[in-house]
Amino acid sequence: MTDNASAAAKMIKGATIAMGDGSYFDFLNPAATTMTIEDYAYALAYTVRSRGQMKHNGRRCFYGVGQHCVHGAEQMLLDGHDRADAFDFLMHESDEMPIGDMVGPAKGLPQLVGYKELAKLVGDGIDARFRVAIRNKPLIKRYDIRMLATEKRDMMAFTKGEAWTWTEGYEPFERPIVPYKHPDEAAVRFIDLYRALGGIDAPPPNRDSCVSCGCLVGELHRMMPAQGIMPARPCWKSGDTVLFGGAW
């Protein structure tokens, strides 16, 4: 290595991981993060739910945390909740951005002492970065559990209707979950919904992204203007309907 190259090299050490924007996330100082919403959205989009044990129409499928957050936030809007509550649900998995999705039944095990404290530390730091302050935690928790019940119904039929204490007393949503064709779709939808709900530092719409709404065309779009959110519009490139397309 030349002297110039040696001088320019940066030694990265400690409990840090690289972000896609070129910064580093420090697990011991998460409040200092400068990650972008793109870093956040893609991390969740590619983080699998339930350790990948999902089947849709009898076939293995990918279903990620990103889609979980998007679907639940959309459901809140459909149910008449305000934009702030939908935003809170969209952003309620901040701790999973850097550390992944630890399955719920394992989180309280004595062998994982300190896990919950670490998750809270990093989650609080990331929430501060994106100005997330969940106002109604019981509401978000209720929708989170109902999303789990819906996921169980739509993608875990192999459980044959077995009762789970986790979802006891919670009904699945009527609107079915259809896994996206690719994790990138979850990331694009996440960023578009983040922008529409008033998230800070949102990037401009991606003209190369065409995310077909599928079953969401109809009721969801009819109620969007009432929530102050843009309705669907045709993609400039393919003509397909795009959800939360931004100003094309």
Image (spheres, rainbow, N blue to C red):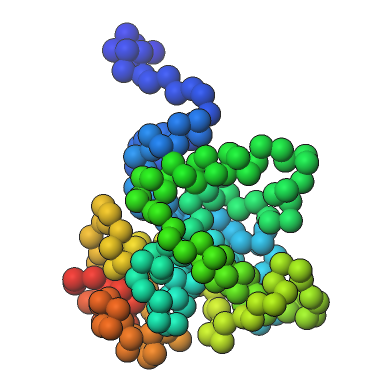
- Residue 98 seen anywhere in this rendered image of the structure: no
Q: How many marks?
A: 0
Judging depth in this view, the residue of 32 and 58 nearest the camera is: 32
The quarter of the image holding the N terminus is top left
Left or right of 236? Residue 48 is: right
Q: Position of residue 56 (x, y in %)?
A: 64, 78
In the rendered view, tell whether residue 104 sits above or below residue 161: above
Q: Position of residue 68 (x, y in %)?
A: 53, 67
In the rendered view, tell whether residue 13 sits above or below residue 225: above
Judging depth in this view, the residue of 146 and 7 nearest the camera is: 146
The residue drawn where x is 29% and y is 12% is 4
In the rendered view, tell whether residue 96 sits above or below residue 139: above
**Furthest residue toward top:** 3
The residue drawn where x is 38% and y is 20% is 10
The quarter of the image holding the C terminus is bottom left
Q: Position of residue 217 (x, y in %)?
A: 38, 87
Judging depth in this view, the residue of 14 and 91 nearest the camera is: 91
In the figure, residue 218 lies in which quadrant?
bottom left
The residue drawn where x is 30% and y is 59% is 199
**Furthest residue toward left:** 247
- Residue 136 seen anywhere in this rendered image of the structure: yes
Q: Position of residue 24 (x, y in %)?
A: 41, 34
In the figure, residue 153 lies in which quadrant?
bottom right
The residue drawn where x is 39% and y is 90% is 219
Left or right of 148? Residue 201 is: left
